[in-house]
Amino acid sequence: MKSNRPVNLSLSTVLAVNSSPVAIASILHRISGVVIFLLIPVLLYVLQQSLASEAAFAAMKTDILGGLVGGFLVFVALAGLIFHLVAGIKHLIQDFGVAESLQGGRLFASLAIVVAGILILCALAWMVL
Amino acid sequence: MRYSATSFSRSGVSDWLAQRVSAYILAAYFVVIVGFLLCNPGLEYAQWKEFMSGNAMRLFSLTALLALAAHAWVGMWTVFTDYLTERQMGAKATIIRLALQTGMVIGVFVYVVWGIQILWGN
């Protein structure tokens, strides 16, 4: 059957051929989106416990956020959300025709990766400290 | 024009728009929640419960939940239809993609129902 969709190369081929900041930001945007989708139950569970009762709120803080597995999962979800948000804002700005040249796009993508990286480090410090 | 049977709105243009509108809502919700947490270090249960239980905040949370449903549907559909293709996986691609797509839609449904229970259940 003839498809009117563009042909997409396999992930490994794309990454091997194209390692520009645009490609890296794009694939991380997708990966972070899938990771967030899979970790939504963790976030909903944290929200549920935090609103259930005084005792559940306290237990959520010590057992989930303070625990190794729970803390790690929440941090991964938070890091994914931060990257997805920053890359998404980049997209929304580019909807208005900003940074559409080759060099402009690369610079903008590099900026998004650096900003997201800094914010993720801040989130790590916020959770650990 | 061919229409996809599994996309969110059956039309690429409306899917594109749904992705944008839901993105703005979700970005605003993330900033409000994280902003509240940053402004209230050492948050107590009573204060958090009061913040989340107000009518305006409940409505905002429900809006974000529905935006999440649309946003996840469009995003996961894009990922599935880009990578789980016959060109890359052979003839079994369609059945795998349909199975994952169905699982994703069930997941989205569970998130929405569970989220409403959290917001109004207690």
Image (cartoon, coloured by chain):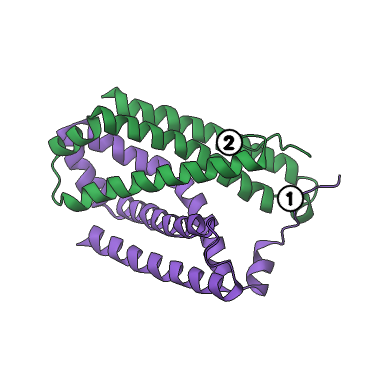
Looking at the rendered image, the quarter that the N terminus of chain A falls into is top right
Q: What residue is shown with label 2?
A: B103
Which of A72/B122 is in front? B122
Chain containing the residue with disc 2: B
Chain containing the residue with disc 1: B
Label 2 sits on what residue type? Gly
* Crowd rating for badge 2 (residues with CA inside 10 Å; few <14, some 14–19, many 20+): few
Q: Is residue B100 visible?
A: no
Residue B84, how many percent across, how many down? 69, 50
Q: What residue is shown with label 1?
A: B85
For residue A117, the mark is: none
Q: What residue appears at the point 32 percent right and 67 percent down from the top-left corner?
A: A121
Q: Residue furthest bottom?
A: A103
Residue A28, how many percent across, how many down? 51, 61
* Crowd rating for badge 1 (residues with CA inside 10 Å; few <14, some 14–19, many 20+): some
Q: Which colour represents chain B?
A: green
